[in-house]
Image: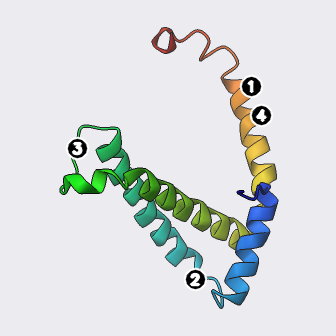
Amino acid sequence: MTKKMTIQQAQDTVDQWINTIGVRYYSELTNTALLMEEVGEVARLMARIYGEQSFKNPDDAAGAPAQLADEMADVLFLILCLANQTGINLTEALQKNLDKKTKRDAERHANNEKLR
């Protein structure tokens, strides 16, 4: 059974892992560069799984969903690292962001013909 965790628990878990197994955080700049690399890997898989691009080796398609999950987890890990490094509470930040979107987009999406 998969353990569920809150965003704060995820931030704390990553911090504990970094400070024990990982030894220390990479610099914020290094982690940002690594984040961009991982986002690129997610994009590559999305283009092949859901887009028009094909896999170079057709046999790679079978393991692609698991690989996509792993790459998304890499992105999340790096976001959590950067939040920890910069003192951002992602629970609060996400709630504020959702509040902003709710106010801004209260009627925007409901009135968008393209979404019907």
Q: State which tag comes first along the sequence, 3 or 1.
A: 3
Q: Tell me residue 2's x, y (percent).
A: 71, 57
Judging by the rendered image, the residue that carries numbered circle 4 is: 99
Question: Tag on residue 53?
Answer: 3
Q: Is residue 25 above or below residue 57?
A: below
Judging by the rendered image, the residue that carries numbered circle 2 is: 26
Position of the N terminus by quadrant: bottom right
Judging by the rendered image, the residue that carries numbered circle 1 is: 103
The image quadrant of residue 96 is top right
Asked if the residue under mark 4 is in contact with the one under mark 3, i.e. CB atoms within 8 Å, the reply is no
> How many residues crowd around disc 4 within 10 Å: few (fewer than 14), some, or many (20 or more)?
few
Mark 2: amino acid: Tyr
Front residue of 19 and 27: 19
Q: State which tag comes first along the sequence, 3 or 2.
A: 2
Q: State which tag comes first along the sequence, 3 or 4.
A: 3
Q: Nearer the viewer, mark 1 or mark 2?
A: 2
Q: Tell me residue 27's x, y (percent).
A: 58, 81
Q: Give me the residue at 37% from left, 46% from top.
A: 46
Q: Tell me residue 66's x, y (percent).
A: 46, 56
